[in-house]
Image (tube, helix red, strand yellow):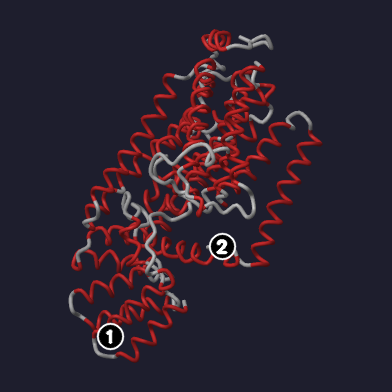
Amino acid sequence: MVITNKSTNANTLEEAGDARQDGGPGGASRLLAWPFVVAVGLYEIGALVALLPVFGDGGDWGAAWRRLLAVSASVALFFVILLFFNRPGRLWWLAVAVAGAVAVVAVFGTAQVSTENLRLNGFNYRIYSLVHKYVPNIGPQVNQNVLGTFLAAFLPLPLAFALWGRSWLWRGYFAVCAGLVGSAVLVTASRSALLGLVTLFFAFALFLTAGRPRLTWLALAGLVVAALGGGAYVLLQGFTSIESGASRLELWRTVLAIIGDYPVTGGGLGQLANHFLPYATPAIYAYPQPHAHNIFLQGLAEFGVSGFVGLLLTLVTAVHLLVRYRQLSALEPALRPVVAGGVTGILVLFTSGLLEYGAWNGKFAPVFWVLPGMLAAAGLRTNFGPWLAKMRPRNLVKTPRPRRLLTGGAVLLLLLLLAPGLLINIGKLLNDPAASAPFYRVAGTLAPWNEVPYRNLGALAQRQGNLAAARSDNNEALKRSPGDWLTLRQQATLLENQGQHDAAISLWRQARAE
């Protein structure tokens, strides 16, 4: 059924949504849903597997259960949208509700950000927000980075409906919502959120230039120039020249050290703050952080491989949809703003996530699966997706034999590369000198470049009181990675306990320099 330009109200869209569109043999109309379903499933599996380190290390079970509840609520919300809003009309009404709710959060949420934390560089927040002047603080304070990232991720949805809506009345409603949300993003002055707005600008440029090849190439050229310009600025000025840049680098180094010990399971659900100090670089040893300030590092550090792959699949699917569904004229009118807003919102979230993770991690965590849920529900009513048909598991098996052999060899090689990390992770979870040592030694043999197994062996030997073996293992770890500050710190502590204070001080200084 074709939706004409006369489809200007929700009832007409609802009726149009009732018409079943099979999309070819096997129901190609359903194909848009399954990549997001797999991603959400991996996200939940990662959360469950990430309970193992909490059990093995005796972590904070209260934080773990609260985090598991938030993750499970996210997954449940995704499937509720997928099952009950899989019609254009229902998606339209869901967008009405989401846009209004986000606008309310923008108004009252911005009022909860203290004026001292608003880094506006001369802007007058009273002009841009209409919030602090008229709305009193009525609740607990909100971090401006978390709020800004949340608002930036949802801003594309009302903006898309304002641009592609079928009724000027509803376009006005969505335009007001977009204005409130956009002004609140400016008020937070969050750099991660502003980075996301850059993604919004270029993604919408690609959507708006659909069917105009010259303008599309112009938009792509602008995107390339902006990316190269940003990269050149960072290279010339140095990342540490940016406010908090030095501490971000130290924080990411710390999180990478945690990932080195827990590459498969992650360090534990909601446990990053508990692990922080034992792994912290000397430069930020006194400043424990609740999250990694990077969505990809947080995915590995908290959810392990499974959750990390789920995040990557969400991002890759959104990029594919941006490329494949950019020509909105080929879509049902009711689904055009859903696709444009949902895809752009996901891309904004991941771009902002390069510097910030709090929005996916904290109070707003469950709502971020709204956008993938809306896209998956839209996929049940579209005729597109032949490219996704090739990704079906049963179709992958039907590939030619040489390709299957090549794929199998690549998978085997990947497993061999992942084997040392798995052994290290198992040894860390066992947390017992006698049981863990064999896993570390095999991992050290399989990965002669990796210092983690011998550093952990040194820690185990020190726990057993075998100081000679501890020093030997630490020295082997330093041969593999001379600048490993964790091994240097561990060796310095060992020397200090043996009364060799001068040598210990030298190693402490070297660790701090590294």
Q: Nearer the viewer, residue 411 or 483?
A: 483
Q: Nearer the viewer, residue 317 or 103?
A: 103
Are the residues tagged 2 and 1 within 8 Å (C-beta)? Answer: no
Q: Secondary structure at mark 2?
A: loop
Q: Is residue 409 visible?
A: no
Quadrant of residue 273 in the image?
A: bottom left
**Which is closer to the viewer, label 2 or label 1?**
2
Q: Nearer the viewer, residue 1 or 353?
A: 353
Q: Secondary structure at mark 1?
A: helix
Q: Nearer the viewer, residue 282 or 376?
A: 282
x and y, in percent, of residue 108 in the image:
47, 37
The residue at the point 67 percent across, 31 percent down is: 326
The residue at the point 52 percent across, 32 percent down is: 103
x and y, in percent, of residue 426 in the image:
28, 58
**In the rendered structure, which amino acid carries the disc numbered 2?**
Glu
Q: Is residue 114 visible?
A: yes
Disc 2 to disc 1, how far (Cα)?
36 Å
Relative side of 466 to 184, left or right = left
> Where 76 falls versus 349 (above or below)?
above
The residue at the point 59 percent across, 64 percent down is: 239
Quadrant housing the N terminus: top right
> Where 412 falls versus 27 (above or below)?
below
Say which mark, if any, is on residue 496: 1
Quadrant of residue 292 in the image?
A: bottom left
Query: Earlier along the polypeptide chain: callout 2 or callout 1?
Result: 2
Relative side of 435 to 394, left or right = left
Relative side of 364 to 498, left or right = right
**Mark 1 neighbour density, 10 Å: few (under 14) some (14–19) many (20 or more):** some
**In the rendered structure, which amino acid carries the disc numbered 1?**
Glu
Pointer 2 residue: 243
